[in-house]
Amino acid sequence: MKKKKMDLKWKQWYFMCIVLASRVAEAHVFDVKDFGGKADGKTDISKALLSAWNNACESLEPSTVLIPEGTYFLGPVILQGPCKSPSIGFQLEGVVQAPSNPFVFKTDGWTVFQYINGLTLFGKGTFDGQGQIAWNINNCAQNPNCKMLPVSLRFNFLNNTLIRDITSLNSKNFHMNFLACYDMTVQHINISAPGESANTDGIHMGSSARINITDTVIATGDDCISIGPGTRNLTVTKVVCGPGHGVSVGSLGKYKDEEEVSGISVRNCTFINTQNGVRIKTWASSPAGIASDIIFEDIIMQNVSNPVILDQE
């Protein structure tokens, strides 16, 4: 019964990917260069990108925002729906670079997608967070009142989302954060930051359901994937993790009445030179909570300090 249930999930995710990909293929394209964006690596394209996004979002037909090949400088930007377009794509073929100085950020996100249905983020390009300065000043592990550094890619309140092929490089904080996202597939992406980079979790999520992460390589200075309260029906397969701290359920129990975590499946993954493999962790003296139906299966560990760890401290 479990295998049949999993087969059905895969068929549903595969069908969703095919539908979203076909919509992108026939979409009307809004190129940032047509809105004044310059690939000179120093002119901020945030206004051009917002103009392209707003036009695509207002379109009544499937639409795609394109950042073509080249190197672009991009300041903090929020790409927001809901959109009139039945599906909207974001195609990144070039390299976009964040401001290297973390103190220029007034918000906790660099590139934010929110309140969108039917988003496809794809392409062979790279989001370069330029986090080297931020890693040296990150003292959040010792200072609870520290300034939060920006997450490279925030996804808030999204439905029916496909993320594929892109690269996230050297984030200042987490590479990707999912909040209240439903029916999301992440496939064939590359996430990379040095092993000594502080708090550069690959993918963090919370209050989200029906998430599928597959065929992906994650190398970070923190958790490859961290699973927060309210995560339900998450499937992780064919992920290569390392360096980093492994795949972590938690930390849980920091606050009272946290949402339940359930239906977590991590299968056919490889961990190389990581601090941990698969982990469930809670804060010390945490209030009551539930984490259930968690499966770790067919895992390869190479030079992993704590292959399986349950930690309540």
Image (cartoon, rainbow, N blue to C red):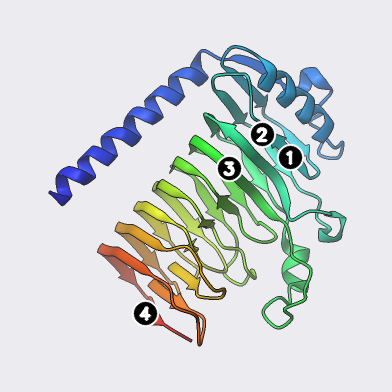
Label 4 vs 1, first from the N-terminus: 1
Mark pair 2, 1: CA separation: 19 Å
Q: Which of marks 2 and 3 is nearer the N terminus?
A: 2
The residue identified by callout 1 is 78
Task: Pick whichever of labels 2 and 4 is earlier in the sequence.
Answer: 2
Reading the chain from its start, which is encountered first: label 4 or label 3? Answer: 3
Crowding near the residue tagged with mark 3, few <14, some 14–19, many ≥20 C-alpha atoms within 10 Å: some
> Which residue carries the number 3 mark?
157
Q: Nearer the viewer, mark 4 or mark 3?
A: 3
Viewer-side residue, 80 vs 19: 80
| Secondary element at image label 2 | loop
User: In the figure, residue 7 lies in which quadrant?
Assistant: top left
* Crowdedness near tag 2: few (<14), some (14–19) or many (≥20) residues, C-alpha within 10 Å: some
Amino acid, disc 2? Gly
Q: Nearer the viewer, residue 100 or 141?
A: 141
Secondary structure type for disc 4: strand
